[in-house]
Amino acid sequence: MSVEYLKKAVLTSKTDASETTRIVQEILDTIERGGDAAALEYAAKFDKYDGEIILGKEAIEAASAQVSDKLKRDIQFSHANVKRFAEAQRQTCQNFEVEVVPGLIAGQKSIPVNSAGCYIPGGRYSHIASAIMTVTTAKVAGCQNIVACSPPRPAVGINPAIIYAAHVCGADSIVAMGGVQGVAAMTFGLFGLPKANILVGPGNQFVAEAKRILFGRVGIDMFAGPTDSLILADRSADAEVVAADLVGQAEHGYNSPVWLVTDTRSLAEEVMALVPKLIDDLPEVNRDNAAAAWRDYAEVILCDTREEMAATSDFYAPEHLTVQAENLDWWLERLSCYGSLFLGEETTVAFGDKASGTNHVLPTSGAATYTGGLSVHKFMKIVTWQRATRNGAKPIAEATARISRLEGMEGHARTADIRLRKYFPSENFDLSAEGLE
């Protein structure tokens, strides 16, 4: 067995993290001290926008009126699919109780967080789908306050389709503010907004770093880097389809890695010949991103067997993983590290990105080894509870007292002692610590 790189990346998806951290921390500190006024100063500087910050009913209606009926139907279609899938996820968050020992009942309860802050990118591309993915999922989870925040264009404001999508999907407030200042507004509860309990949604490196810094103070969906995609393809794959899918993901950004893993040299060579031609045929703004991503970050890897292909994929733990190969059930069972999986030529990453129902806010940079993407579960707190009869508490108290004393935690032990003395005054208990030399 061997792995051969027919194309190797010359760069990795990293930024000058220390400088980004310094800039973001300074902005957050300034806004926390200065409140609304400081946030507005940064909005004027970076967004170059001095219009309405919290959109009112008239502004939302005016923006919605600019969206064509056809686009509204597409947004509604995507919203319905995402909602349907999220509702199915919500059904998996089951409350339960179990009698652990006779007389002691313990249970689990799922409680949605109160306030969610949803960041919706609007810079290079207007991420209408991100409004659908984040707001809809928070709404289905049961969040009482949902704030949608998106960067406005100078003298224009937020893209009308983003406003319409956020409104239709259930946003309680729509904030025209981008970047770190937008994240800060949701976190600190500026402009009369509720303070966010969790921040979700994609963004540039400054937005991602702001979320990282604020994690712990608030929850976040995940630490995000540049989007990445991997395709597993065997001899049955269509080289033109594989190439188109690679290019489609490379256009995300100049540093968005795309990887092809295959056991068929002829397929790899054909795809490598096709990709530059497909990139050249893109509009200029898309072409520049895709060309840089393919040149500097893309890899084509040749393996001997499908098991080796699967192992390579799990090692990369891609955000998006496409399988264009025979025996799809084998791949579904075998693969274990990915953000979202697309099985067969009949589906593609763009379907999940825009309209099929699964969420497109996914783990990047290998994070799929330990986490999945945005889901209803991210907005839920899984909490536990217990209650007991006096007889049910008896063996628990005995074990607690002895374990606590073995640990040296006498105060803990005495909370068990007092109950045993109260509930069973006529009994003698051996609650001494034994077993440690």
Image: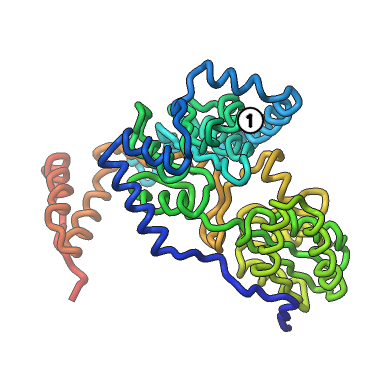
Residue at the image point whose x is 52% and y is 30% from the top: 139
Q: Is residue 181 left or right of residue 276?
A: left
Image vertical order of residue 405 relative to residue 7, above or below = above
Please indicate, yes or no, whether residue 179 appears anywhere in the rendered image: yes
Which image quarter is the N terminus in?
bottom right
Dividing the picture into quadrants, the one containing residue 276 is bottom right
Residue at the image point whose x is 18% and y is 68% from the top: 434
Front-most of 106 and 114? Answer: 114
Q: Is residue 222 left or right of residue 399?
A: right
Dividing the picture into quadrants, the one containing residue 237 is bottom right
Front-most of 179 and 227? Answer: 179
Secondary structure of the residue carrying tag 1 is: helix
Which image quarter is the C terminus in?
bottom left
| Residue type at the position of mark 1 | Ala
Image vertical order of residue 98 relative to residue 174, above or below = below
Colour option used: rainbow
Q: Badge 1: how crowded within 10 Å, few (<14), some, or many (20+)?
A: many
Q: Position of residue 23 (x, y in %)?
A: 37, 55
Residue at the image point whose x is 51% and y is 60% from the top: 370
Please, which residue is most extreme toward the bottom here?
1
Q: Position of residue 73 (x, y in %)?
A: 73, 26
Please indicate, yes or no, whether residue 143 appears anywhere in the rendered image: no
Q: Position of residue 331 (x, y in %)?
A: 73, 61
Front-most of 118 and 160? Answer: 160
Image vertical order of residue 212 relative to residue 6, above or below = above
Q: Is residue 105 left or right of residue 305?
A: left
Q: Position of residue 20 (x, y in %)?
A: 42, 58
Please, which residue is most extreme toward the top here?
58
Q: Which residue is mark 1?
A: 161
Number of numbered discs on residues: 1
Residue at the image point whose x is 72% and y is 75% from the top: 7
